[in-house]
Image: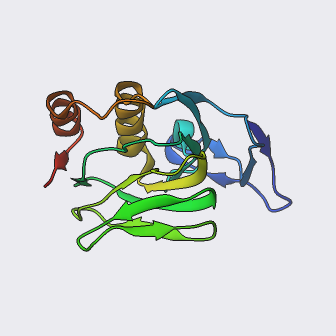
Amino acid sequence: MRQMRAVLPARRGGAGRIQAMTLLTHRGEGPAFSYAGNPMHILAGHSGQPPGFAAMEITIPARFAGPVPHAHDEFDEAIYVLSGRLLVAGEDEPQEAVPGSMFVAPRGYRHGFSNPSGEEARVLGLWAPPEPALAFMRDIGAALTPDTPPDPDRMREIYARHASRLLP
């Protein structure tokens, strides 16, 4: 991850440390971890930069069953579709999200998604605040596989550990 200092003076953060005013992360850069067998690149939010949100680029495999419908109690989540298509679900019937669509799930609200199409989808995921969301995504991403539905018991354990719940 490349940090670029702005022309404006840097601000003092916690404990008097100087924080960079801007960050620039190129595609494929930044820390990454697995999500359903594909790399998930952290574009913002890693190591508290910036402290308010996390952003990650994720490739969703074709015919991916997706996570079990769920809710998070400690962070908000949004998914912006860059390419491909997803089937997204909230409280109502699932709907198709095409490039340029954003799906938002505030804390406590039921949501889920899948990729029933034959092509991968590329999305930008946004979460706030970043710390609990990154910890959750790291654990859940490692547990999901691209070609088999998630194991509900394993999902329940991971979700509970991260102040999240599986829902019908």
- Vertical placement of residue 22 versus 42, above or below: below
Type of colouring? rainbow
Percent x, y for residue 112? Answer: 32, 55
Query: Could you say which quadrant of the image residue 93 lies in?
Result: bottom left
Q: Quadrant of the N terminus?
A: top right
In this view, the residue in front, 93 or 9, is: 93
In this view, the residue in front, 3 or 117, is: 117
Q: Residue furthest right?
A: 7
Q: How many marks?
A: 0
- Vertical placement of residue 85 versus 150, above or below: below
Percent x, y for residue 158? Answer: 23, 32
Horizontal arrangement in the rendering, residue 106 relative to residue 16 (left or right): left
Residue shown at 35% from the left, 33% from the top: 140
Percent x, y for residue 47? Answer: 54, 36
- Vertical placement of residue 18 versus 149, above or below: below
Q: Quadrant of the C terminus?
A: bottom left
Residue shown at 53% from the left, 39% from the top: 61
Percent x, y for residue 77? Answer: 40, 58
Horizontal arrangement in the rendering, residue 117 relative to residue 30 (left or right): left
Residue shown at 49% from the left, 58% from the top: 86
Residue shown at 66% from the left, 55% from the top: 11
Horizontal arrangement in the rendering, residue 38 relative to residue 127 (left or right): right
Q: Residue furthest bottom?
A: 92
In this view, the residue in front, 159 or 119, is: 119
